[in-house]
Image: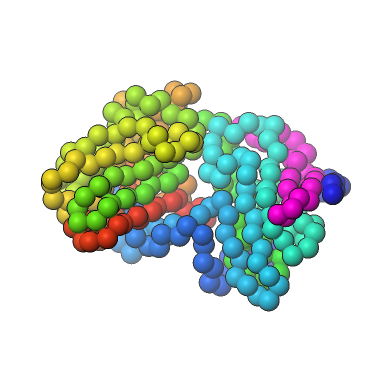
Amino acid sequence: MLGLRSTRSLLTGVARAGSIAAVALAFLGCGGDFAYSMNGSPDAAAYESTPDLGAAPASDLGFGAETIALTNPAPLASDVLAATTFDFDAMLGDAPDRLEAGITITPRGTLTPLAGAFSWKSYSAGYKLSFIPSAPLTDATDFVISVADPRSTFAPPLLHTGISTGSHPRVTAVTLHAAGAGAGVYFTFTFSEPMSTQTVIASVSVTAGGQAASGHALLDAANSQGGYRFDLDAGHPLPAPIVLRIAAGPGGATALTGVALDPASWDSPTTASDGSFQVIFSSVDLAAPGAIDLSWAPTIN
């Protein structure tokens, strides 16, 4: 089934108010408040939760599970083209027009969402829902994408993420992995757009307990989206805090466009005192038995 809705302006109103209500939501992929990023000593205000910004299940309010994922552009992507259609995969209890009033795509720092039209197509697992803006996206602009839960104005949003037009490289995810008992320790991390591999590898460093930790950066062969990893050398103590830093600015990591990495990732306090990007894992015991996977993702207000 294929449907097309008439062009209209997306409204905020109750949908936006409902999207920020304080109702518990168990996000897929959530790593909890394990990591924080800041310029100095630990501060509770700097702790970062790690929601999966691509898709999240709504709390079951008696209407069955509903999920929605942004499939194009990728969540947190930058260098997005101005002539972009926003595509979503949705699993719903009924037709996707229930979602339309609650979908807002808003230039960051403004209160006026984009105007445009919706189209949708049903398939065996749900719906393909698309939003077609009525005009090209403004260049060099951040956009916040939010989808309110249509079942309740008090529920958290089904989706809350962002994208950027123009080249604006940011770090979009960091995970600290360990096999247990101090073995197999490495970081994986991703960016919002394709990066110059040489500049990234030369710009990554790790400290443990305030001291430089030896290791090496490389492309993450397991990540088809062009992610990176930093493998720490075995046989050395790695006391907390464990800090991953990526140099930004002149001489630091750059995108393929030549634009330097932005050390501030959306609304997360990730800019170190030297201007680099950093994420701090403050209370991890890498000597403990058992595997560890601690994740960080940026906050978008």
* Residue appearing at x 75%, y 41% in the figure: 132
Colour convention of the picture: rainbow
User: Above or below — where is 276 with respect to 43?
Assistant: above
Residue plotted at (31% across, 57% down): 292
* x then y, percent, for residue 36: 34, 56
Asked if residue 117 is among those painted magenta in the image, a careful observer would answer yes
Which residue is situated farthest in the front direction here? 124
Q: In which quarter of the view is residue 190 placed?
A: top left
Task: In this rendered view, identify the residue nearer to me: 155 or 26.
Answer: 26
Q: Is residue 102 visible?
A: no
Residue 217: percent from left, percent from top: 29, 34
Does residue 267 belong to the magenta stretch?
no
Q: Give the residue at x 36% y 49%.
A: 175
Q: Is residue 178 visible?
A: yes
Q: Is residue 129 above or below residue 83?
A: below
Q: Main secondary structure of the magenta part?
A: strand
In the rendered image, which quarter is residue 253 located in? top left
| Left or right, 177 with reference to 255 | left
- Stretch in magenta: 115-139
Task: Tell me where residue 67 appears, x and y as whole percent.
Answer: 64, 59
7 to 282, vertically: above or below: above
The residue nearer to you, when weighing 130 against 146, is 130
> Left or right of 155: which side holds 285?
left
Residue 122 placed where, x, y %?
Answer: 78, 51
Q: Is residue 238 left or right of residue 169?
A: left
Give the total number of marks visible in the rendering.
Answer: 0
